[in-house]
Image (cartoon, coloured by chain):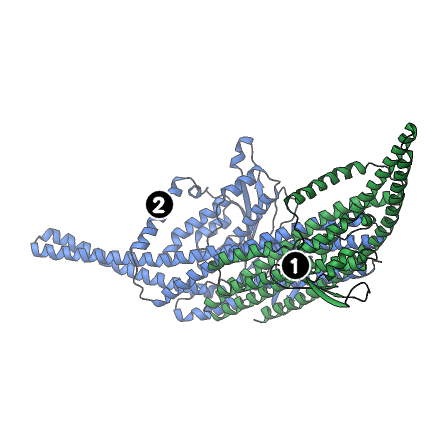
Chain colours: A blue, B green
Amino acid sequence: MEPNGVSVIHIGDQQVSLQPPSFLIPSLPPGTLSLTTRTMASSADRNPPPFPASEEPEPELSDMADGDSDEGEDIFVSNVCLQPCHTFYNSLKVESFFFPPLFLGDGMNAYVAYKVSTRTSLPMFKSKAFTARRRFSDFLGLYEKLSAKQSLHGCIIPPPPEKSVVGMTKVKVGMDDPSSVEFVEKRRAALERYLQRIVSHPLLLQDPDVREFLERDDLPRAVNTQALSGAGFLKMITKASDAVSKMTIKMNESDTWFEDKFQEVDMEEQQLRKLHAVVDSLVNHRKELCMNTAVFAKSMAMLGNSEDNTALSRALSQLAEVEDKMEQLHQEQAGSDFFVFAELLADYIRLLGAVRGCFDQRVRAWQRWQEAQSTLQKKREAEAKLLWANKPDKLQQAKEEIGEWEAKVTQYERDFDRIGMTVRKEVLRFELLSDWSRHVLTVFVCLALISFQLIKFWEAFLPEAKAIA
Amino acid sequence: PDALCERDKVKFTVHTKTTLSSFQKPDFSVPRQHEDFIWLHDALVETEDYAGLIIPPAPPKPDFESPRDKMHKLGEGEATMTKEEYTKMKQELEAEYLAVFKKTVQVHEVFLQRLSSHPVLSKDRNFQIFLEYDQDLSVRRKNAKEMFGGFFKNMVKSADEVLISGIKEVDDFFEQEKTFLLDYYSKIKDSTAKAEKMTRSHKNIADDYIHISATLNSLCAEDSTPNKKDLWKLNLAFFIHLQKVEGRVASDQELKLTELLRYYMRDIQAAKDLLYRRARALVDYENSNKALDKARLKSKDIPQAEEHQRQSLQKFDKLSESAKKELTSFKGRRVVAFRKNLIEMAELEIKHAKVSSVLFSLCVSLAVCS
């Protein structure tokens, strides 16, 4: 099925569409997830760079399932792909529009509302398609809730894009500024990727909070995500105390697998950070180049005008046109692609941070276990002392406490093991590079096309140049 | 004549092959420095006889500042980069250095060639000395006073130019030329500046690609999972090629387009100088006319005034004639040069685009297969 009005290049089984218009209707074979975008910035005329539509090939998921089968518990993964009769697709769209302030006094309280549209055939949702209006703090609130609950089990929760006071103020103050439009667009794309990742995580999808987020018309405002609030400070304090406890208590790692993976993740994060910095500067330079080329083209055109030799004049103005066209090409296509590169990298760096958090969870579970064990030990000693001092009533109490603590110890131990297993599964599942490779492919294709175009342009210019008498 | 170059302290070796009888030997070479070229140029400019000619512009001082700065920065930043990255950047810088070098040689060469192909200027005594004199010319460098004097002269000249541009032009041809040249000059100056910025951006991008490929390289080296590794390698290859292509595009563009514009900017300046000189001659002539009239009124010193007037008229006429010839040939020359350079640039761009399209298609097919 062809998306309307879009040229689609079939490369193998992957469908990559170039220059999609702003609205795409995907057709989805069973068992795959797809991503569509639609942007609606209310006051801006220009079309922000659209996110290319792509389909995740199915084999990838099943590969992972096979790899995990030796771990044992695979209920969640199999839900996704080993039941082809259960046609399941879940598509997510995030649009954005600006919620206009009611009175002037409300200026700083204005916010950007994002429309989240879901289309699904999963039975757990009430209807097939629904939309909800959400604002940025809602997304953050969802993250808070999820991490509070799920992190106890050792899942990797994808982190949302960061709060940016500067960016938002700019948006609120001046709507026509192109940089603020860009900001909103960046945020929208990031939020979309965030939601997409959550939805594609089978565990998280089961969570009622996620469902609520997608379905409910009105969410209670997540107040504790505000930067300067009591909850915010509390968070900072807990973060600090965590850091301290990490430094003081060194876990003796029984499982080398975790140790290795941790190192790997660490190194990868470092490298990605470096890469991100360089890609950022690349994006900036490209922008610069586009600007400069445009300016140059204009001055060339003027030069061509003042040139009295007609053939040369024509040639010069042709040159100006060629340069102009080149610049446009570069800006539209390659520019936005590299830009998305940078965004993806930033996302990955954050994700790696989340993976780290996962490992930390495991360490914390171990700590709890150890603490419980030492408390148990102390209680036993107390009991022994009491026995020796012969105080029967306190003895009874002590025995109860011991029983209690023993139960806790076993529970924590089990928790720890379970977390360990979940973390393992999660990390294996963590496919860092799937979108990356897809994206790289689009960039390649894009650049190839650009170079073809360039050839045509220059070849058209050549006879003009030769014709100068 | 030909110009070869040695490194360090920019000594040029001017190699001449000639069949003119005025030279002692048919084939000889002498070492020269940049200041010698400047001296020659100034000498030509100051000769009254050549007032009616367009003196080709002096080559600019060889500028190794920017690559030298970059080298320095590179040395400082060595600690933060990996070995390969460092060597790559160094290579890039060396290439840039070489490019600057080549450009300088080219510019000097062009200067000499124009002198020798000019029917009048090639017979100039100074020029011949320049080509022949075996020992070091030991040209007296302009001391501070002379520099200042030269600067002052320039200021006077530009003030004069403004005054003179108001003079009514007797000849339509020159009127046209004047307006055209003035206009063209400002435009071409603008274009040159913009072109320079553009090529610099290109170079920046090429540098970025080096960094990216280096980082990808290290990512590749550290990563254990095989399919990830392949992916990174693929990315790496991609970026390396991108960088090479981009870098080459940038340097070619610079050579052809920017240099062309720059050179003609200076040439047009020289043409403007010619016009200026002519206008000054015209002013002189008119002044002498007025003096003659005044003398006639006072009826004394008439013969001197007449003589003076006749001389200035003669000068003016001679100047105008040669100026006309020069300007027309200049136009033709300019058109030809533009044509040549534009064609070459277009061809190079096509070549690059073809190469990169092949590369990218290859990358695409590789990516799909893997």
Going by the numbered disc 2, the residue's amino acid type is Ile
Q: Quadrant of the N terminus of chain A?
A: bottom right
| A433, A409: nearer the viewer | A433
Q: CA distance from mark 2 to mark 1?
A: 53 Å
Q: Give above or below for A42 relative to A446.
A: above
- The chain that hosts pointer 2 is A
| B296, A249: nearer the viewer | B296
Residue A290 percent across, percent down from the top left: 65, 52
Residue A83 percent across, percent down from the top left: 50, 67
| Residue corresponding to mark 2 | A237
Left of B270 or right of it: where is B194? Answer: left
| Residue at screen point 81% across, 44% down | B277
Going by the numbered disc 1, the residue's amino acid type is Ala
| B275, A139: nearer the viewer | B275
State the image quarter where residue A456 is shown: bottom right
| Residue at screen point 45% across, 46% down | A141
- The answer as to whether the residues below labels 2 and 1 share one chain is no
| Residue at screen point 49% across, 47% down | A216
Residue B128 in sight here = yes
State the image quarter where residue A203 is shown: bottom left
| Residue corresponding to mark 1 | B250
Left of B287 or right of it: where is A348? Answer: left
Residue A91 in sight here = no
Rate crowding at label 2 as few (under 14), some (14 to 19) or many (20 or more) other CA atoms within 10 Å: few
The answer to whether marks 2 and 1 mark residues whose Cβ atoms lie closer than 8 Å is no
Q: Quadrant of the C terminus of chain A?
A: bottom right
- The chain that hosts pointer 1 is B
State the image quarter where residue B40 is shown: bottom right
Residue B91 percent across, percent down from the top left: 57, 64
